[in-house]
Each structure stands twice: as structure tokens, then as C-alpha cells.
Image (spheres, rainbow, N blue to C red):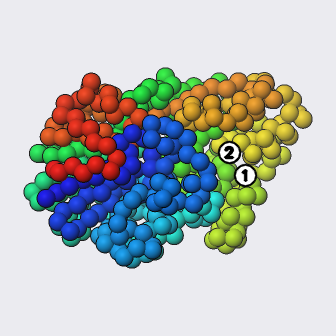
């Protein structure tokens, strides 16, 4: 009998963990650190720092963890966001962990720059290629490249006992890889018994007026075209689609794009997987060396890497001297450092502060508004979600026509049956036979 159990995700966004069982064989899909409690409640920092089954941070799974007798066959990671892989350090060391090459590259980057608690030291990581079936015990697994703000993300098709389960992971249909959803819906997998589908955006709060990553790039282009003073761009260094949008828009307007070492290092690493990614030879990318990042590289990789980037190094004085041509994609600490020098020359009231991340972060942390207030800089939000909107969720369900559709990675799973057919709602910890 083929069974699934959601350990976490039926009523929450992030911390996803699903168990699939056939006979005595069990695999785990994602082992994420929770971002919130059930229904969006807050989790105490103390519990997150000391995850255990007792405090509910580690899903209660037999044979998965270091101090247990191993009985889980493998863990599959859909992508390199910590809400999907952040608990791997507690895993039994001989259980293999499968992820894409891009996900592994991002996990490795995390080992250089992330705070100790977010570094992942899983010892037995295996990589797979998308669309190439592989086997783990009775399970036949195929990764489908997913369009998501996490690089090289996977959706998984899991076949066993003549049944098919499709787990979307986190996905969308409006990013730079929107084509993969077009292909999946144009030539859908037939006879899907169970679709586990994320529904992050369904509660609202994820749309800030842009519908696609292309629209984000167009807006950035428009801003840089009219630029009269430095543009500050606040974006995630791991959102590669967004980095490409910023890069292209800056390049089109002959601006100098200044990156921090973390962001530059991310792009350098991922270029080995996707050579078309920036940076490119003789382009306009410069690097501002900030102490924290430089120390992380010196300590964890070696100073040679810092020397090898020297030809792109830029100093604050050089930025100030060319201020109207600068696009700065830096952490807020770096922006403050540059802004302090810029205002000595003249005020920043012509500069733009482009907030290019989820608006929830803007509400949570006052540092962005404080910056704009202090320097009289106009804040503009230019962002599109990393997660599918309703139209693409519908497009997928209508193509795959699953016999059972199970909501996951959502706060509004109870609303799924308003929009989709064959919704089966299961609680965290509940078994479901497929
Ligand atoms: Zn997620
Ligand atoms: Zn994600």
C-alpha cells in the first residue's frame, strides 16, 4: 500500500516535510526549518535554536535522526530555501540526501556565508539531473525543474505500486523559467493519483502590482533610465532571477552595478551550472568589499578568492565620484556606509531606494524605512512573488487532473476547494492511502 503523511505543511508556509511509504520503504520529501507555527503563529527562537521532537521543531519520524536506528531510505530536497532543507543537520549521517546540482551549489554557498545555525553539513548528498528518472528502493523518482525564486528548484514525480504522486515543491509560472510550467501543462503527466500543491499566495498579501519577473525588469529599466542619483536596490542575493533582472536593467542603461561579495560569489558559483548567468567579461559589475563577507571568504575558502576578484573591486570614493551612474545591490549595512559618504557631497533626495523583496520584510523590519527617512530617499517597491498565483495553480491542476489534490505550504488550504476539484484535506500527521 502506498501512503503519504504530511508531517508539517498542511496549515503553514515553510518547514515542509512529507513522508511517502511503500511497504517497509520510506522516503522524506523536504526537511525544512519552520518559519511559523500552525496557522501562522510565532515560534519561539529558543525552540528553533534547539530543535527536538519534543518541542515540535523536528517532525516525529522514526529512523530519521542521528540518535535513532536508521530506517528511512532517503531524503529528497526540492530546493535550497531553509524552510525546505534547514533541518538536515539532525539527519542520520548515512541517510542519503538527494538534491539538484544548483541546490547543492547554494547549500555550499550557505556554508561560506550563513550564520553557523544555518550551515548544513549533511554528509551523504547525492545530486540528480532534472527529467532523468532514478530509483530509491521501490520508488521511481523524476525531478521536474520548477520556476521558483530558489535556484534550480525541483518538483518531484514519485511512482510506486503503479501509482503517481506529484509534489510541486515551491513553484510559479511567472519567473524566468516560466517555460517549464508551460511545457508541463502542455504535455501533462498522465494519471496523477495525488498532487501535493503549494498555495502560498492564496491568502493575498503576495501581490504588489507586478505580475511577472519580466515586468519587474521593465520597471527597473524605467527607474534606471530616469536615474539622477544613486539607486539603492534591496534584494535577496539568492534570488537569482531577480539578480538577472537588476543586471540586465543596469546594463541596458550603462549603469555600474555594485554587488556585495556574497552576491557576486553566488553568481560565480552558479555560472558553473548555468554559464549564461552574469557576470560576463568586460561588463559593468563591480564589487564592494564589506568586512563581514570578506572575512567569511578568507576564513572558509581562502584569501585567493578575494584576490581573484580584485579587478572588479570598487571603493566608496569611486562610487561617490560617479554617483549618478551607480546601482547598488548591497545589504543595508553597506548602503548605510555608502550613503554616509554620499551625503557629505550632497543630499540623497534624488536617489531611489528600490525594495525588491517580499513586502512582509518591509513591515517586519523598520531599517528600510528608517534609511529612507534618514536620507530623504524615495522608497519604491518592485517585486513579484516566488510563488504561483491562482491562475497558474489552476493551470497546473487542470492539466494534471489529479484524483486527489492535497494543499500544502499554505495558510489557506481550507479555501482550496473554492478553486480546485478533488481537494482532499489532510491534517499534519494523518496517514492517507493513495
Ligand atoms: Zn517554501
Ligand atoms: Zn522556496
Residue shown at 84% from the left, 39% from the top: 340
Q: Position of residue 377 (x, y in %)?
A: 74, 26
Label pair 1/2, CB-CB below 8 angstroms:
yes
Q: Which of these two is toward me, 407 or 109?
A: 407
Whether residue 317 is visible, yes or no, is yes
User: Percent position (x, y) of residue 228?
Assistant: 72, 26
The label number, if any, that marks residue 267 in the structure image: none
Q: x and y percent of residue 363 in the render?
A: 62, 30
Residue at disc 1, CB closer than 8 Å to ligand 2:
no
Of 342 and 248, the residue lying toward us? 342
Q: Residue furthest right?
A: 344
Q: Residue at x 28, y 49 (%)?
A: 430
Give SS at disc 2.
loop
- The numbered dot on residue 330 is 2
User: Which residue is painted at 19% across and 30% down in the image?
Assistant: 421
**In this picture, residue 100 sits left or right of residue 157:** right
For label 1, the residue is: 288
Check disc 1 and report its element: helix, strand or loop. Answer: strand
Badge 2, how many Cα within 10 Å: few under 14, some, many 20+? many
**For this view, does 109 lie left or right of residue 125?**
right
Examine the rendered structure and indicate whether residue 272 appears above or below residue 367.
Answer: below
Q: Is residue 83 visible?
A: no
In the rendered image, residue 171, in percent from the top left (x then y), is placed at: 36, 42
Q: Report which quarter residue 393 is drawn in.
A: top left
Amino acid at each position: 500500500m502506498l501512503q503519504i503523511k504530511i508531517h508539517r505543511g498542511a496549515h503553514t508556509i515553510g518547514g515542509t516535510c512529507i513522508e511517502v511509504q511503500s511497504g517497509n520503504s520510506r522516503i522524506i520529501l523536504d526537511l525544512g526549518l519552520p518559519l511559523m507555527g500552525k496557522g501562522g503563529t510565532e515560534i519561539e527562537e529558543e525552540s528553533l535554536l534547539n530543535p527536538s521532537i519534543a518541542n515540535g521543531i523536528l517532525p516525529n519520524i522514526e529512523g530519521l535522526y542521528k540518535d535513532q536506528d536508521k530506517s528511512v531510505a532517503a531524503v529528497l530536497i526540492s530546493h535550497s530555501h531553509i524552510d525546505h532543507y534547514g533541518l538536515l543537520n539532525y539527519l542520520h549521517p548515512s541517510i542519503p540526501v538527494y538534491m539538484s546540482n544548483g541546490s547543492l551549489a547554494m547549500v555550499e554557498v550557505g556554508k561560506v556565508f550563513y550564520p553557523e545555525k544555518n550551515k548544513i553539513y549533511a554528509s551523504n548528498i547525492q545530486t540528480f539531473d532534472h527529467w532523468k528518472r532514478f530509483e530509491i528502493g521501490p520508488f521511481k523518482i523524476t525531478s521536474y525543474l520548477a520556476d521558483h525564486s530558489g535556484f534550480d528548484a525541483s518538483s518531484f514525480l514519485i511512482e510506486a505500486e503503479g501509482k503517481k504522486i506529484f509534489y510541486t515543491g515551491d513553484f510559479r509560472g511567472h519567473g524566468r523559467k516560466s517555460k517549464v510550467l508551460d511545457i508541463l501543462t502542455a504535455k501533462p503527466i498522465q494519471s496523477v493519483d495525488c498532487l501535493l500543491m503549494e498555495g502560498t499566495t492564496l491568502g493575498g498579501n503576495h501581490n504588489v502590482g507586478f505580475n511577472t519577473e519580466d515586468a519587474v525588469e521593465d520597471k527597473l529599466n524605467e527607474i534606471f533610465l530616469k536615474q539622477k542619483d544613486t539607486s539603492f536596490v534591496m534584494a535577496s542575493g539568492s534570488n537569482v532571477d531577480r539578480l538577472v533582472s537588476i543586471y540586465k536593467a543596469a546594463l541596458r542603461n550603462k549603469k555600474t552595478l555594485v554587488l556585495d561579495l556574497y552576491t557576486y560569489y553566488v553568481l560565480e558559483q552558479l555560472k558553473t551550472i548555468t554559464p549564461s548567468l552574469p557576470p560576463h567579461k568586460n561588463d559593468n559589475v563591480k564589487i564592494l568589499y564589506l568586512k563581514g563577507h570578506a572575512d567569511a571568504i578568507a576564513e572558509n575558502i581562502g584569501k585567493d578568492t578575494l584576490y581573484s576578484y580584485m579587478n572588479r573591486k570598487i571603493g566608496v570614493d569611486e562610487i561617490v565620484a560617479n554617483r549618478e551612474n551607480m546601482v547598488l545591490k548591497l545589504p543595508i549595512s553597506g548602503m548605510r556606509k555608502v550613503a554616509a559618504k554620499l551625503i557629505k557631497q550632497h543630499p540623497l533626495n534624488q536617489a531611489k531606494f528600490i525594495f525588491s523583496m517580499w513586502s512582509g520584510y518591509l513591515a517586519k523590519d523598520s531599517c528600510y524605512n528608517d534609511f529612507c527617512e534618514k536620507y530623504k530617499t524615495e522608497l519604491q517597491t518592485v517585486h513579484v512573488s516566488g510563488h504561483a498565483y491562482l491562475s497558474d495553480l489552476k493551470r497546473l491542476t487542470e492539466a494534471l487532473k489529479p484524483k486527489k489534490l492535497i494543499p500544502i505550504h499554505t495558510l489557506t488550504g481550507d479555501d482550496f476547494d473554492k478553486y480546485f476539484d478533488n481537494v482532499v484535506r489532510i491534517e499534519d500527521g494523518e496517514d492517507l492511502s493513495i
